[in-house]
Image (cartoon, rainbow, N blue to C red):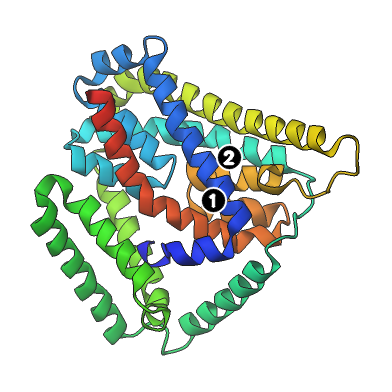
Amino acid sequence: ARLGADIKSARKSCGPLLVSFILASVATVLASTVALSVGPTQSLLANALGNDGLKVAAALMAKNIGGGINYFAVAAALGMDANAIAAGICVDNVFALIYFPASSALGSGLPDVDDNIACNEKGVEAERSDNVAMQSSDGVSVERVSMLLSLSTLAAWMGRLIGGKPNALPVSTLLTVLGTTLVPARWIEPLRPAGEILGTALLYIFFATAGAGGLSIADSVKAAFVPIGCFLTILYGVHGSILAAVRRLVLWNRRRSSKGGNEDGDEGIVARQRLLVASSAAIGGPATAAALAKANGWSSLVTPSLLVGNLGYAVATFAAIAFYRLMLG
């Protein structure tokens, strides 16, 4: 996933959706702050999970900006207990089963925004080249897999060396993002097909080991379900409310400025299609955002959703750790 986290590419190619995604990410941060500051949510988390209560909240914030890999990265960096890790991700999965159908229903029937044609054409061409590369003998080879494993090992070693055990994963992530952003694309592009396959396989292994506890963690999940559920209810509710409020405010200000003139059909960064895809990229990651765009026929948003979702992977871990430090203080 980190090989796709090219900040320069996202900034240049996906302007409107990038701004929408930043808005969705800020909405998640504000929603997490509200969830812990209003009502008894923080005390409920502390009663159920002890010192891990705030850590679970920070990890869930990371997951709802980037993805599951950020959740586990924050959990490792903050030293969360295995039962607390499992409880947080299990409850979040339940809420995701409600969120994703709801977001799909909200976007049903809306036309494609049809912007970022250059980004879309570039993305389609890149997607085609990636597919060709993956199907050919040159796409995935022993040499490229070995190169990726070597680079990953180097990044992990440098992360441990620079950040120590608690901060090894965030530092490794930062080094990888810097590498994909600063290193010339002609050196990175050939590694991406092999990186996608290798990363996906390792991610499946990781999730399998994370759930290996099985029924032994059932009691922990039951005890923490209500506190974590309260936190996520507020997070999702405030997240959506902020996006809806910003949309209304921007459109109201635009109508006021136009003074009754003809309004442009393109609603810009607050178009419902963009906000839904951006929210899905934050809550679920690039794969779910791209799936939402494809399912609703928003072809111009498919590739940008992948780019901004990968950007979420890049920043979510750092944002969540900073959030935890601030809330702890």
Does residue 89 appear left or right of residue 19 in this picture?
A: left
Q: Which residue is mark 2?
A: 100
Q: Which residue is mark 1?
A: 288
- At 72% across and 60% down in the image, what residue appears? 115
- At 43% across and 21% down in the image, what residue appears? 34
Q: Dividing the image into 4 quarters, which one contains the C terminus?
A: top left
Q: Position of residue 43 (x, y in %)?
A: 29, 12
Quick check: 189 above or below 68? below
Does residue 109 appear left or right of residue 31 in this picture?
A: right
The 10 Å Cα crowd at callout 2, few under 14, some 14 to 19, many 20 or more, is: some
Q: Amino acid at mark 1?
A: Thr
Q: Position of residue 307 (x, y in %)?
A: 51, 60
- Residue 89 visible to an observer of this rendering: no
Q: Amino acid at mark 2?
A: Phe
Calculate the distance from the C-alpha at mark 1 to the C-alpha at mark 2: 8 Å
Quick check: 220 above or below 62? above
Q: Position of residue 298 (x, y in %)?
A: 71, 56
Quick check: 3 above or below 53? below
- At 25% across and 49% down in the image, what residue appears? 209
Q: Secondary structure at mark 1?
A: helix
Disc nearer the start of the sequence (1/2): 2
Does residue 53 appear left or right of residue 250 in this picture?
A: left
**Cβ–Cβ under 8 Å for marks 1 and 2:** yes
Q: Quadrant of residue 213?
A: top left
